Image: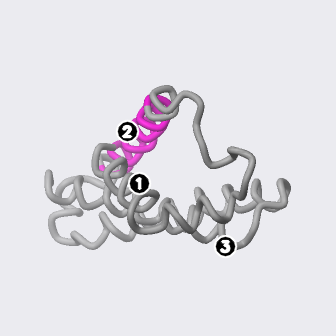
Amino acid sequence: MVAAMVVQAVWYGPVLGRARLAEVGPGGLGLRIAPTRTLLLTAALLLVSATMMGHMFARVGAATLAVKPWLYFMMSGGLAGAFVIPGLWISYTQQRISTRLAMIDGSCVMLCYLAMGLVFFLLG
C-alpha cells in the first residue's frame, strides 16, 4: 500500500502531474478541496487491494511462489490489467473522460499494482 502511494505521488507529481492537470482542464477539477480526506481514502482503498493481493498470494502458497517468483508480478499486473483498469476505463467512457487521461490513470494503476507485487516478492 505504501509503495503504491509513493508511485502515485511520483506519477501524479513530477512525472505526469502537469499533463493530468492540463487534461482535466480549468474549473478546479484537478484541485482537491480536502487533500487529507483524499489521501486517507486512497490509503484505505489501497489497503483493501493490498490485503486481497496478499490473500491471493497466500492461496497460491509460499512453496509455489518460491519456485515461480514471476507469479508475484504476473498476478499483480494481471489484476490491474484484467480487472481494475478495464473497470476504470468503462467508468471513464460513461463519463466521457478523455483517452489521454484514461491512459495516465491506467498506467498509474498498473505501476501501483506492480509496486505492491514487488513488496510481496521482497517480503517473500
Check residue 57 in the rendering and tell me which mark sits there, or answer none. Answer: none
Bin the neighbour count of mark 3 within 10 Å (Cα to Cα): few under 14, some 14-19, many 20 and up: few
From this view, report whether residue 116 is shown above or below residue 38. below
From the top left corner, tell me how far across and down residue 68 is, in percent.
23, 72
Is disc 2 placed on a helix, strand or loop? helix
30 inside magenta stretch: no
> Residue at position x 66%, y 63% from top?
86
Choose between 100 and 75: the one closer to the eye: 100
Earlier residue among tags 2 and 3: 2
Q: Residues within 10 Å of mark 2 (few under 14, many from 20)?
A: few
Q: Amino acid at mark 1?
A: Gln
Label ID, residue 51:
2
Q: Is residue 2 left or right of residue 35?
A: left
Location of the N terminus (image quadrant):
top left
At a point 36% along the width and 51% down the height, the residue shown is: 4
Mark 1 → mark 2, Cα distance in angstroms: 18 Å
Quadrant of the rendered structure where residue 119 is? bottom left
Q: Residue 100 placed where, x, y %?
A: 67, 73
The number of numbered discs placed on residues in the rendered structure image is: 3
Q: Is residue 83 left or right of residue 113?
A: right
**Which of pointers 3 and 1 lies earlier in the amino acid sequence?**
1
Which residue is identified by label 3? 100
Marks 2 and 3, how far apart at CA: 30 Å
Q: Which residues are magenta?
A: 40-57
Q: Nearer the viewer, mark 1 or mark 2?
A: 1
The magenta stretch spans residue 46: yes
Bin the neighbour count of mark 1 within 10 Å (Cα to Cα): few under 14, some 14-19, many 20 and up: some
